[in-house]
Image: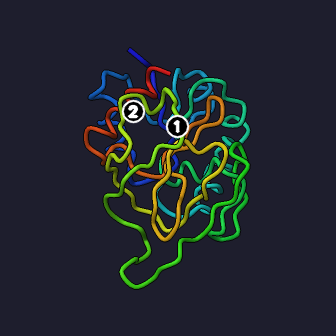
Amino acid sequence: MKEVVIVDSGGANLASLRYALERLGAHVAVSADAQAIAAAERVVLPGVGAAARAMQRLSGAGLTEVLLRLGQPVLGVCLGMQLLCAHSAEGDTGCLGVLPYPVRELQSAPGRPVPHMGWNRLRRLRADALLEDIPDGEYVYFVHSYGAAVTPDTLAAADYGGAWSAVMRRGNFCGTQFHPERSGAAGARLLGNFLRL
């Protein structure tokens, strides 16, 4: 049984992420304790809300350096993936910089409101263990107003007024812009793949 610590970043998706991982057989704790996070077999960085407030919370808890030093698999979810990037246009916020890319605001247009909310297809760009058994074109669930463009570390993209990173990975740091805990069987497969990394 994998031991997973979900970083207590104050996000509203903590409980649903916890239940999704527990359904896959993981032992899950929610914690802001630096030692517990550093010792975990897997770490999930969730996030719902504003980048600046989330970074302030991580910094105030003394977690930014801890997160940067992690060598075990780490998964950022939604805002959590954006926090792994270098900078967010939301509040002109410096982020962790593990993924050295900016996060930009999505632009609304007729028939394409922001936030981008609902089901959208994944377009796989390269093979990775994180995407095993998730076919190209699978639907997953998004809720976001900001995102990272497609980069060399993008595993899968989604199109919403242009292509955006939906799944990213650099070494042990992974991220999903969508919510795997709300994405049915495809989301469960991704979380299961993360537990097996």
Contact flag, marks 2 and 1 (Cβ < 8 Å): yes
SS for dot 2: helix
> Seen from this angle, which residue lies furthest top?
1
Tell me the residue at 44%/24% (across/down): 195
Give the residue at x 36% y 41%. Answer: 17
Splitting the image into 4 quarters, where does residue 89 fall? bottom right
Q: In screen coordinates, is 110 left or right of 103?
A: left
- Towards the viewer: 10 or 142: 142
Name the spot of residue 96 as percent of width and height, x first: 70, 48
Residue appearing at x 66%, y 29% in the figure: 70
Q: Position of residue 139 (x, y in %)?
A: 31, 50
How far apart in space, not on screen, are marks 2 and 1 (Cα)? 9 Å
Disc on res. 75: 1
Q: Position of residue 69 (x, y in %)?
A: 72, 31
- Please state if 147 lies on the left or on the right of 185 as rendered: right
Residue 191's disc is 2
